Image (cartoon, rainbow, N blue to C red):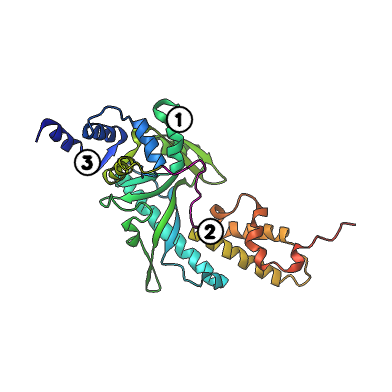
Amino acid sequence: MNDNDIALSFDTAEYYSLLEACDYLNRKYKTDNLTPKKLLKQIYSRKINAFIHFCMHDLSKQILRFQVESYGSNIFTKEIYELHKGELESLIEKVEQVETIISNRLIDGLSMGLVLFKIYENSLFNMSLSSKSNNESRLLLLDGFVYMPNINDDPSKPSQLSEWTINKDGNEYFFTEIGAVTLVIDSTNDDDLAEFSEKSPFLCSFDKRDDFSFPELNIKLNDIIVLHKDLLILEREILNNKSIKDKSKFETRKGISHKKILAKEFAKHVADEHWKQDIENQIKIGEMCEIVWAKLLDSSFDKELPEHRENLRPWIKEVAPSYASEAGRPKS
């Protein structure tokens, strides 16, 4: 084995920073042309997974949680659209309890440095174009995770999901596929946010809402991690001259989260129930949107609500009686 082969063996690892990945590829192909910025553009363009890793100790589970979108689980029945209100409420409870289990396990993993979080591709795009120092960009949304020691899992289907379960009525329930993962601080108090900033390895800003805040992590080029198996995929695509897909428009996420389905079905149940009790035929669809909006807020569906109350119309149109869409009586 010559000196270059020995050096390459030491460069080979299970995961790399972008700089380490460049060193590995440059040595492997005897070039010095590849840079972290060039590599990042290829990672984004070819939809290669990229991750961040960080460790935060002594986090308070009372104010910190992970909001997890579920795109698959064993909680839902095939007849979900035929379930009555009580059954929907039971499903809502199960989904929320599984989400809480996952959140607590991720916080435990975060305190021990056991989690790699997949970076949302829009963030990679922004970083690839950033002119800031070290191509830094704010990261709000994560797109899945892998949990040690199963580093080569699919980030949307980490194997731990089947272990993070709840037991109800003798049955175990769990998520089988996840989408977006978001850090949430259940506080807008400046002292709480300052404590999070102090413990975070990244500079932070915060998007404050009514009673919670989204921390926005300021990540840099040096923070990005790529796994060896994904780097091999990137190598093969480039060596085989595989074309890059047109990404002039960001692709929308396929499918819909389970909790969004529940929210829509719950909205229909609420609207249908109120219209059945409307014996004088007075409630128009605009007013029903207000009623349903308030009920969804009370039922912990605030994250699934559309931007405006009027946008609930498509959710409840199916159960609206004919008189609900007619023009209201003119004011005298």
Answer with mark 3 or mark 2, whichever residue precedes in sequence: 3
Are the residues tagged 3 and 1 within 8 Å (C-beta)? no
**Quarter of the figure that contains the C terminus:** bottom right
**Residue at coordinates 30% horizontally, 27% vertically from top-left?**
33
| Circle on res. 130 | 1
Q: x, y percentage for residue 61?
A: 40, 49
The residue that label 3 is drawn on is 13
Q: Secondary structure at mark 2?
A: helix
Extreme residue toward the right, this view: 332
Query: Which residues lie in the magenta part?
Result: 244-256
Q: Give the residue displayed 45% in from the left and 30% down from the top.
A: 130
Residue 172 position by quadrant: bottom left
Residue at the outermost left position: 1
Closer to viewer: mark 1 or mark 2: 1
Residue type marked 2 = Lys
**What label does residue 164 carry, if any?**
none
The picture quadrant where one finds residue 111 is top left
Q: CA distance from mark 3 to mark 1?
A: 28 Å
Badge 3 amino acid = Ala
Q: What amino acid does circle 1 point to?
A: Ser
